[in-house]
């Protein structure tokens, strides 16, 4: 599934969390309050942590818990930072994005296509769907409203 991008997003490959993060997925979810957060969320293959500014991300905490990051090169293959209004701080081979949504390269192609359709949808259609109570630009909106667009 595609995830909606906030202003700054630290996007982490869920595989890296499973393989490297101390105490794994559940601990990561607890550390970043994934379940009840409006900004931090996940899909089947990605975690996304949102902030208003890129310097608010605690990369050292991720490293202390097992993820890789090269401070000199300012690069990690485990995660990247994507700004909604710019490109990624560094590209990783497992992520694609269009500055509104981001998705793992192994995401279901129909779900990725849906994200692209929402991106290209005229504002009047988005307004109609919002008036019907459909939230298109949030994490679960794409999956829930797939058959209603």
Image: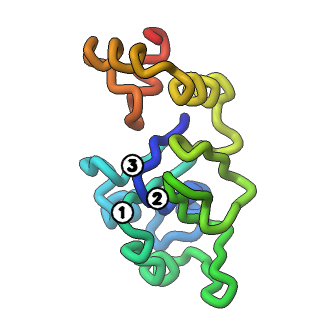
Give the labeled residue for mark 3: 41
Give the labeled residue for mark 1: 51
- State the image coordinates of residue 134 (x, y, percent, origin top left): 32, 19
- State the image coordinates of residue 32 (x, y, percent, origin top left): 33, 62
Res 21 label: none
The relative height of residue 140 versus residue 95 in the rendered view (above or below) is above
Secondary structure beneath dot 3 equals strand
Q: Are the residues at dot 3 and dot 1 in contact (C-beta closer than 8 Å)?
A: no
Give the labeled residue for mark 2: 9
Mark 3 is surrounded, within 10 Å at the Cα level, by few (under 14), some (14 to 19) or many (20 or more) other residues, namely many
The relative height of residue 2 versus residue 5 in the rendered view (above or below) is above
Color theme of the render? rainbow
The relative height of residue 51 versus residue 85 in the rendered view (above or below) is below
Q: Are the residues at dot 2 and dot 1 in contact (C-beta closer than 8 Å)?
A: yes
Compare residues 127 and 101 and report the one nearer the observer. Answer: 127
Mark 1 is surrounded, within 10 Å at the Cα level, by few (under 14), some (14 to 19) or many (20 or more) other residues, namely some
Quarter of the image where the N terminus is located: top right
Residue under the image location 33 percent in, 66 percent down:
31
- State the image coordinates of residue 23 (x, y, percent, origin top left): 44, 68
């Amino acid at each position: 599934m595609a995830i909606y991008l906030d202003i700054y997003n630290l996007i982490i490959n869920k595989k890296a969390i499973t393989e490297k993060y101390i105490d794994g997925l559940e601990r990561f979810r607890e550390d970043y309050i994934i379940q009840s957060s409006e900004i931090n969320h996940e899909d089947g293959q990605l975690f996304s942590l949102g902030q208003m500014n890129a310097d608010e991300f605690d990369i050292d905490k991720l490293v202390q818990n097992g993820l890789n990051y090269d401070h000199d090169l300012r690069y990690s293959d485990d995660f990247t930072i994507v700004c909604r209004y710019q490109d990624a701080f560094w590209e990783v081979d497992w992520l694609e994005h269009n500055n509104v949504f981001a998705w793992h390269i192994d995401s279901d192609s129909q779900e990725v296509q849906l994200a692209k359709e929402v991106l290209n949808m005229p504002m009047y259609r988005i307004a109609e769907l919002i008036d019907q109570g459909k939230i298109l630009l949030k994490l679960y909106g794409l999956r829930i409203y797939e058959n209603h667009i």
